Image (cartoon, helix red, strand yellow):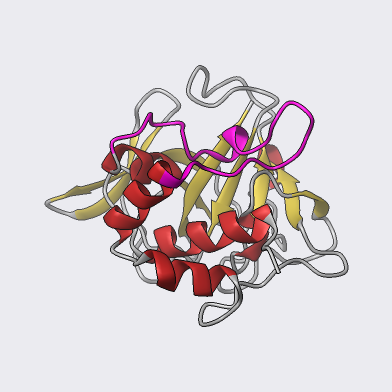
């Protein structure tokens, strides 16, 4: 049976994340245009999912160091067996940026909880990531990096690296979106709002830093 294109892309995304690549980083490493593998480029004018060309796929798999035969078996459900959304799938929890500092919207591990969260269709294919959520931006204070009315997809389960876009949040604290930095005193966040640098939280603080994987406008 021929695999559905969304299974194909989901499998490719899983392999890329396991090796620390975003779609843009993977495309650049393969010598492609930086946007070639972005979720927005995977849908045609009629709404149908696109398939990459064979030369493009081979270049990407070479970067991932995955043989074509192994990738084909993974897409067919042998080995990786990527989970696809079932009933209610394809949705992510969503909350406005201005509400993140409220008490009770994150649990003791910094993950979304409580009835205040809404649900909406996942931008891209991030519904397969554990505890992924969407933050709707309702401020113009971070423009032009993050636009008022846009949204960001946050994936807490992904490891943090220097230069990653991240969200720093905690109960009763103003949330901060910015870039992850590593200095002499350890990791810190350089805010998109004015470039302020926020020092890493001490162990006793209920403050979490989660990786932003996608921004929409």
Q: Is residue 162 above or below residue 48?
A: below
Front in this rendered view, residue 67 or 116: 67
Magenta region includes residue 78? no
Front in this rendered view, residue 181 or 80: 80
Front in this rendered view, residue 178 or 88: 88
**Residue displayed at 80% across by 63% down:** 89
Name the magenta segment's main secondary structure: loop
- Left or right of 124? Residue 91 is right
Q: Is residue 43 visible?
A: yes
In the picture, the quarter occupied by the C terminus is top right
Residue at the left extreme?
184
Q: What is the x, y in percent for residue 114?
A: 79, 65
Q: Which residues are magenta?
A: 31-54
Q: Is residue 200 above or below residue 70?
A: above
**Residue displayed at 11% across by 51% down:** 184
**Residue displayed at 52% across by 38% down:** 38
Front in this rendered view, residue 56 or 79: 56
Residue at the bottom extreme?
79
Q: Is residue 81 above or below residue 214?
A: below
Q: Is residue 164 visible?
A: no
Magenta region includes residue 46? yes
Q: What is the x, y in percent for residue 151?
A: 65, 36
Q: Is residue 150 above or below residue 50?
A: above
**Residue displayed at 47% across by 60% down:** 208
Q: What is the x, y in percent for residue 50?
A: 64, 40
Q: What is the x, y in percent for residue 160?
A: 35, 57
């Amino acid at each position: 049976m021929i695999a559905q294109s969304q299974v194909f892309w989901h499998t490719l995304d899983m392999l890329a994340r396991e090796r620390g690549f975003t779609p843009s980083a993977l495309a650049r490493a393969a010598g492609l245009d930086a946007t070639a593998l972005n979720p927005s480029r995977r849908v045609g004018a009629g709404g149908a999912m696109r398939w990459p060309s064979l030369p493009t796929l081979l270049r990407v798999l070479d970067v991932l160091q995955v043989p074509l035969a192994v990738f084909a078996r993974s897409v067919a459900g042998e080995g990786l067996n990527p989970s696809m959304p079932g009933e209610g799938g394809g949705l992510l929890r969503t909350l406005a940026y201005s509400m993140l500092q409220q008490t009770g919207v994150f649990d003791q591990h910094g993950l979304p909880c409580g009835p205040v969260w809404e649900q909406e269709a996942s931008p891209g294919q991030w519904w397969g990531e554990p505890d992924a959520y969407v933050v709707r931006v309702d401020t113009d204070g971070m423009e032009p990096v993050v636009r008022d009315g846009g949204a960001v997809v946050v994936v807490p389960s992904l490891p943090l690296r220097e230069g990653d876009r991240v969200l720093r949040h905690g109960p009763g604290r103003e949330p901060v979106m910015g870039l992850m930095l590593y200095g002499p005193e350890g990791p810190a966040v350089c805010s998109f709002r004015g470039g302020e640098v926020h020092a890493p939280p001490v162990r006793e603080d209920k403050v979490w830093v989660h990786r932003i994987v996608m921004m929409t406008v």
